[in-house]
């Protein structure tokens, strides 16, 4: 989730301007947003193969780039989002995605109608998380997958029960995410974490220990970004992030959590 506080417009899309950059969603094509965009995009790219030849629902699609990416491999992608401007944007810019405006607490899909539900960087925005998980179970076919990512509460908002991001309602750690999905009737296949790879660890060291904090400081200062920082941020790719499971990394120290759960 972006920490930018600016409200500048994104780059023009093929069918008109992009959505405004408010900090609620990440947007492709902006140098100052590229870290957050790549940090979110990596999960889509690493898990896209799980959607191959399947009917996919993206519940909460934001700018829509992820739903369009999944459309490269899926049989069909439908996206549901409550935000009217996001619905109009995705409908115009990403014609391969079937777009429905609706409430994630009452998904406008029939029972057992999709094979995969994708919910990346959304659950932390929802007031009634168990109700949403129940809706995911309802619309999934038996054996279907719920794939979810969310900021790790332990590292995203350390030492506080109140999310630092004003658009978040409840953030989760790995144990809480596991409990939420298990209590919702899912079998947990895996819980992994997103981490900085070697090059991003180098940028952390270059900027006093945290490339994230360096970006937040510039956003809060509402001043032009130093050219070297902007160039470093613009050069980040999905390859600069690692996704590791609990057998190879400390999930509680991860940036984001990635869960795959199965509907029995």
Image (cartoon, rainbow, N blue to C red):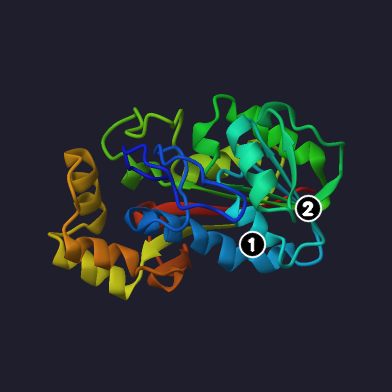
Kindly tell me whether residue 145 is visible in this rendering: yes
Which residue has dot 1 on it?
69
* Residue in the image at 35% along x and 59% along y: 31
Q: How many marks?
A: 2
The percent coordinates of residue 138 (x first, y second) are 80, 37
Which residue has dot 2 on it?
144
Instruction: Look at the picture and state if 162 lies above or below 172.
Output: above
- Indicate the secondary structure of the residue bearing disc 1: helix
Distance Cα–Cα, label 1 vs label 2: 20 Å
Q: Quadrant of residue 168?
A: top left
Instruction: Using the image as rendered, state which of residue 219 and residue 49 is in the foreground.
Output: 219
The percent coordinates of residue 153 (x first, y second) are 38, 41
Neighbor class of circle 1 (other Cα within 10 Å; few <14, some 14-19, many 20+) is some
In this picture, residue 120 sits left or right of residue 206: right
The single residue placed furthest to the left in the displayed view is 208
The percent coordinates of residue 195 (x first, y second) are 38, 62
The percent coordinates of residue 163 (x first, y second) are 36, 32
Neighbor class of circle 2 (other Cα within 10 Å; few <14, some 14-19, many 20+) is many
In this picture, residue 115 sits left or right of residue 32: right
Kindly tell me whether residue 83 is visible in this rendering: no
* Residue in the image at 43% along x and 52% along y: 256
């Amino acid at each position: 989730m972006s920490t930018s506080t600016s409200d500048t417009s994104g780059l023009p899309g093929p069918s008109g301007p992009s959505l405004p950059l408010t900090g609620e969603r990440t947007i492709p094509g902006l140098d100052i947003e590229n870290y957050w965009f790549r940090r979110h995009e990596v999960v889509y790219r690493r898990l896209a193969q799980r959607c191959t030849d399947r009917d996919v629902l993206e519940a909460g699609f934001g700018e829509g780039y992820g739903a369009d990416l999944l459309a490269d491999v899926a049989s069909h992608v439908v996206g549901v989002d409550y935000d009217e401007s996001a619905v109009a944007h995705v409908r115009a810019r990403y014609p391969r995605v079937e777009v429905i405006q609706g409430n994630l607490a009452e998904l406008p899909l029939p029972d057992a109608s999709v094979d995969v539900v994708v919910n990346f960087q959304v659950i932390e925005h929802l007031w009634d998380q168990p109700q949403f998980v129940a809706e995911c179970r309802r619309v999934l076919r038996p054996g279907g997958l719920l794939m979810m990512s969310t900021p790790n509460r332990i590292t995203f908002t350390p030492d506080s029960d109140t999310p630092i991001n004003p658009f978040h309602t409840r953030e989760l750690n790995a144990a809480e995410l596991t409990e939420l999905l298990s209590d919702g009737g899912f079998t947990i296949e895996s819980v992994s974490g997103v981490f900085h790879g070697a090059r991003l660890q180098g940028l952390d060291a270059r900027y006093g220990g945290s490339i994230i904090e360096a970006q937040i400081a510039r956003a809060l200062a509402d001043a032009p970004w130093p050219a070297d920082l902007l160039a470093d941020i613009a050069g980040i790719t999905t390859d600069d992030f690692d996704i590791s499971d609990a057998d190879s990394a400390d999930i509680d120290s991860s940036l984001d959590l990635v869960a795959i759960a199965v509907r029995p």
